[in-house]
Amino acid sequence: GFYPAPRAVLSQPQARFVWRRMPGVGEYRFELRNEDGERLHTALTRDTTLLLDLAPLNLAQGPAYAWSVSDAAAPGLLSADHTFRLAQPAERQKLDDGAKALRQELGTEESPLTHVMLAQYYAEYEAFDMACAAYERAIALAPEISDYRTLYADLLTRLNQGAYAAQVRAGGQ
């Protein structure tokens, strides 16, 4: 699978891009382009995951951006384009207000359960980047609670990230 999922709305300045391993590929070329096809960022990696700080790219909120990966040694072997956009300020404010209310209702900000509840809240509003971050925080705070890994893996499976979901279920992250 690929993440962010097609037409995803990203709410955080850091984005994790994930793609399937392509047989025989040793190094991938990641490309991020605007709606006009202008290349905004390129990176080389041997992994199938890339963590990218979007803030320095000064991306506008609203327009769609496309990303793809190719074999760095044979650029003609290219994935399909996957698109995302950054959340509008009103969308982000609504998410933040809801999360703040949930934190107040639960009473403790740094508990694993609070982060699980936040993850479920974010997933409900399709802010999957924030949901993943919240699950990862809950697991970091309480690695012995396998239910948190199961919930996170279920979300990853929903996002077509089966291989990563299996790794999370097995206790890796």
Image: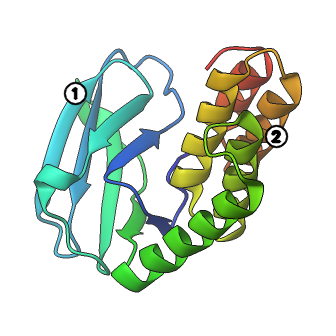
User: How far apart are labels 2 and 1 at the CA level?
Assistant: 32 Å
Q: The residue tagged with tag 2: helix, strand or loop?
A: helix
Q: Is residue 124 above or below residue 53?
A: below
Residue at 62 percent across and 45 percent down: it is: 109
Quarter of the image with the C terminus is top right
**Amino acid type, callout 2:** Leu
**Amino acid type, callout 1:** Leu
Q: Where residue 30 appears, x then y in whole percent?
A: 27, 39
Residue at 69 percent across and 36 percent down: it is: 111
Residue extending farthest to the right is 147
Q: Where residue 90 appears, x then y in whole percent?
A: 41, 85
- How many C-alpha atoms fall within 10 Å of the one at disc 1: few (<14), some, or many (≥20)? some
- Identify the mark at residue 110; answer none if there is no mark: none
Left or right of 78: which side holds 92?
right
Q: Is residue 35 above or below residue 160?
A: below
Q: Where residue 118 appears, x then y in whole percent?
A: 67, 54
Residue extending farthest to the front is 107
Q: Are marks 2 and 1 in contact (CB under 8 Å)?
A: no
Quarter of the image with the N terminus is top right
Left or right of 58: which side holds 1?
right
Q: Where residue 160 appears, x then y in whole percent?
A: 68, 46
Foreground: disc 2 or disc 1: 2
Residue extending farthest to the bottom is 90
Residue at 62 percent across and 23 percent down: it is: 140
Residue occupied by mark 2: 151
Residue at 51 percent across and 26 percent down: it is: 21
- Identify the mark at residue 44; answer none if there is no mark: 1
Give the mark nearest the N terminus, 2 or 1: 1
Nearer to us in this view, 89 or 85: 89
Q: Is residue 157 above or below residue 147?
A: below
Left or right of 164: which side holds 166?
right
Nearer to us in this view, 10 or 111: 111
